[in-house]
């Protein structure tokens, strides 16, 4: 999900800065849309990505499918198979699956790399015309060919409440996926073992609100749940029982797994585990990052975002170095799972993507 923040030396103020920066960006985008609606012009031609009406929600570099990256946006799901050189709308366009919906959250199975999921929600507030054939059903969509084609796996009506907030792919099987229904609080985590065809509700989890959930590629059946108020919880049995991750204090709103190295970022700093989550230590207590992304190909290397810059570590979070400046304020980042020197950074307003292939020394625009 799109996010922004600041690198803060005064702990506990990340959320206030997140809200302020995101609000400013949203107001700027709204002003552009209003000008267009009233016959005004921003001076920028509409792009292949929807122009000023569109913005980015998620970016995902795929594992085991070289140079392939997906963009979930407000008015389309885009795929590149050549490192961003060219893009194709693969869903949410007129006549496609997810037509008329916003593509919101992406997840790739840690067991079957061809299996990808997308949470698609009702599209509001863009001013974009409705699809000629009518809007598709909101819910969970899935692909079994690394994002080239998509189908509805579970409509939002399959859950007690349609307030789907996020998804995460599980490691308990090739078709395991989790869904979080935010309005149900700690009782709102559901799991499917058949790519969304059937669901069961997990026992109450020790987290509220739930920020994210993800399976552990290094340990089949293990799942991590993180919360902006209660930190990180770990289940070794697919969510039947949970334990709080030792060594973490405060809320966590960014989590990235790279083999046995796990990064967790929150208001009180950055916590890192080098033993698969058995123990966490405070690696950096002075900085606050909103997004973390590490590559299993080099677990000690990770990228982190602030409201204005990208930072990179090569020693598992002990020290950070600012990467080369990007053309816009970054909102999302996804590292190539097979090559830690390659990372994609996403911009929301206006929508764009830049890539580095030299570990952040330089960036090249690949979508704008």
Image: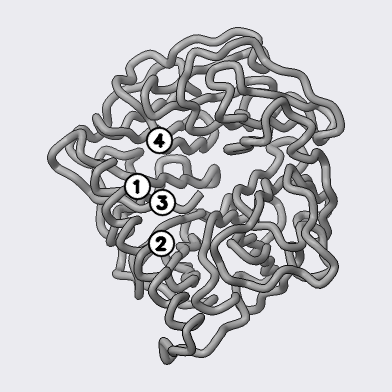
Q: Along the horizontal axis of the image, is 5 left or right of 42?
A: left
- Please report whichever mark, 3 or 2, sits nearer to the chain's N-terminal start: 3
Task: Give the x, y percent position of residue 291.
Answer: 40, 46
Give the labeled residue for mark 4.
253
Disc 4 versus disc 2: nearer the observer: 4
- Please report whichever mark, 4 or 1, sits nearer to the chain's N-terminal start: 4
Q: Of all residues shown, which one is farthest toward the left? A: 10
Checking the image for residue 59, the label placed there is: none
Q: Using the numbered discs, state the Cα–Cα distance from disc 3 to disc 4 in whole angstroms.
A: 10 Å
Give the labeled residue for mark 2.
359
Observer able to see residue 181: yes
Q: Secondary structure at mark 2?
A: loop
Q: Residue at x 67, y 15 (%)?
A: 202
Using a 10 Å C-alpha cutoff, classify the residue at mark 3 as few (fewer than 14 neighbours), some (14 to 19) or many (20 or more).
Answer: many
Q: Along the horizontal axis of the image, is 234 left or right of 316?
A: right
Q: Are dots 4 and 2 in contact, CB under 8 Å?
A: no
Task: Give the x, y percent position of residue 283.
Answer: 27, 32
Give the labeled residue for mark 3.
3
Q: Secondary structure at mark 1?
A: loop
């Amino acid at each position: 999900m799109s996010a922004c923040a600041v690198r803060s030396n005064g702990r506990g103020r990340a959320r206030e800065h997140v809200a302020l920066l995101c609000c400013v960006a949203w107001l700027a985008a709204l002003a552009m849309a209003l000008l267009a609606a009233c016959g005004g012009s921003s001076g920028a031609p509409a792009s292949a990505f929807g122009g000023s009406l569109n913005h980015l929600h998620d970016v995902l570099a795929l594992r085991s499918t070289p140079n392939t990256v997906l963009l979930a946006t407000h008015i389309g799901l885009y795929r590149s198979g050549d490192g961003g050189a060219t893009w194709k709308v693969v869903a949410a366009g007129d006549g496609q699956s997810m037509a008329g919906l916003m593509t919101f959250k992406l997840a790739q199975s840690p067991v079957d790399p061809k299996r990808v999921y997308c949470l698609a929600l009702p599209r509001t507030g863009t001013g974009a015309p409705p699809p000629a054939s009518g809007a598709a059903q909101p819910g969970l969509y899935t692909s079994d060919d690394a994002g080239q084609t998509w189908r509805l796996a579970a409509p939002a009506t399959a859950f007690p409440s349609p307030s789907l907030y996020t998804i995460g792919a599980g490691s308990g099987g090739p078709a395991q996926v989790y869904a979080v229904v935010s309005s149900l609080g700690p009782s709102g985590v559901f799991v499917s073992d058949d790519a969304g065809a059937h669901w069961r509700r997990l026992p109450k989890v020790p987290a509220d609100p739930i920020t994210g959930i993800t399976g552990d590629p290094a340990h089949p059946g293990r799942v991590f749940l993180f919360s902006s108020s209660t930190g990180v919880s770990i289940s070794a049995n697919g969510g039947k029982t949970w334990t709080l991750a030792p060594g973490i204090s405060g809320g966590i709103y960014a989590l990235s797994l790279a083999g046995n190295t796990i990064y967790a970022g929150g208001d009180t700093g950055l916590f890192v585990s080098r033993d698969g989550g058995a123990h966490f230590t405070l690696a950096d207590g002075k900085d606050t990052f909103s997004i973390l992304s590490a590559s299993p190909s080099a677990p000690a290397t990770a990228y982190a975002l602030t409201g204005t810059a990208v930072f990179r570590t090569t020693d598992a979070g002990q020290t950070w170095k600012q990467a080369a400046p990007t053309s816009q304020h970054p909102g999302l980042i996804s590292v190539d799972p097979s090559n830690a020197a390659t990372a994609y950074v996403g911009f929301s307003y206006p929508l764009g993507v830049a890539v580095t292939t030299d570990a952040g020394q330089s960036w090249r625009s690949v979508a704008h």
